[in-house]
Amino acid sequence: MRKDPFSQKQIRQIKPSDAKAWFVSLHDRGYKQSTISTVQCVVRPAFEMAVDDDMIRKNPFKFKLSDVIPKDAFVRTALTREQQDLYLQFFQEYGGGSYYDDIVILLGTGLRVSELYGLTKADLDFPRRCLYVRRQLCRTANRPYFITSPKTKSGIRTIPMTDMVYMALKRVLKDRTPPKTEMVVDGCSGFLFLDKDGRPKVAMHLENYMRLLQRKHRWALGEDFPVVTPHVLRHTFCTNLQRAGIDIKSLQYLMGHSSASVTLDVYTHTDYNSVKHAFDQIAANL
């Protein structure tokens, strides 16, 4: 952006039409609305200061971005009920049992995969049939295991257990072989999900495993079966709750979103049949 001709203009020369045209040009060159919004958040206060200093009469960046740049939030694809059943059956048959319970829990809780692997034994409350999301467990090529807070403050939450999730967590605990020494990561230990070496699993374990199994999708599930990732499972959970009629604030809480607009615009997915079913339920009262 530094080499952009717009950056060579003097502050006094810039009109609202120039600012809008610049943002349109950035969008046409492939910049997402979120990126352009960040740019606006930087330049708008700077020009407001120029207004305060009487350098310009009006802030040219004081406009609603959505009136200029279309929203480009990506609506993820959710699995249908039939596809969910087929995928779980496929995973159980061709995955050799490995990671099956991880998939069941993700599909039944909507957790981010790093939140799933951040769970410790202390985060499970079987009497109340719920689990507590308090952290994310991460690892990168340049950093060893480390703990981060959930993605937003709203990410710290309590998730009810369905019967399938309850049984899956029981199996995970039963099959968990305690390591000789429990790994401690930033003061946390007793991680629920361990790899074959007794170390906590991280997102790349499951992501790589699911990627390898995708080679069998075509002949086992059909060429048109969607690619399934941990994020797709999260979107599917959210959409299942939405279609079941849960209110948006409860759905926002369970997903750990800071804003209900994220829940509505990005993570939910509907079709005519779902709309028709919802419409039929209220039609008598119209």
Image: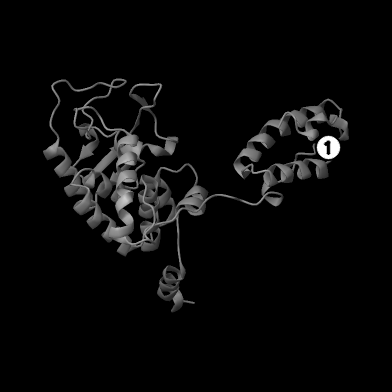
The amino acid type found where label 1 is placed reads Lys
Looking at the image, which residue sits at the far bottom? 284
For the image, the number of numbered tags is 1
What residue is rendered at 37% in x and 61% in y?
223
Is 180 located above or below residue 32 in the figure? above
Is residue 172 shown left or right of residue 258? left
Q: What kind of colouring is applied to the model shown?
A: one colour
Q: Nearer the viewer, residue 71 or 276?
A: 71
What residue is rendered at 23% in x and 27% in y?
199
> Residue 55 lies in what quarter of the image?
top right
> Residue 3 lies in what quarter of the image?
top right
What residue is rendered at 39% in x and 25% in y?
141
Q: Nearer the viewer, residue 82 or 273?
A: 82
Report the residue marked by disc 1.
58
| Residue 186, percent from left and from top | 32, 20
Q: Nearer the viewer, residue 127 or 12?
A: 12
| Residue 220, percent from left and from top | 28, 59
| Residue 84, percent from left and from top | 30, 58
> Residue 191 lies in what quarter of the image?
top left
Q: Is disc 1 surrounded by few (<14), some (14 to 19) or many (20+) residues within 10 Å? A: some
Is 128 located above or below residue 42 in the figure? below
Q: Nearer the viewer, residue 192 or 49?
A: 192
Is 247 located above or below residue 137 in the figure? below
Is residue 254 shown left or right of residue 94? right
- Helix, strand or loop at label 1? It is loop
Is 201 located above or below residue 225 in the figure? above
If the image is split into quadrants, where does the N terminus sit? top right
| Residue 227, percent from left and from top | 38, 52
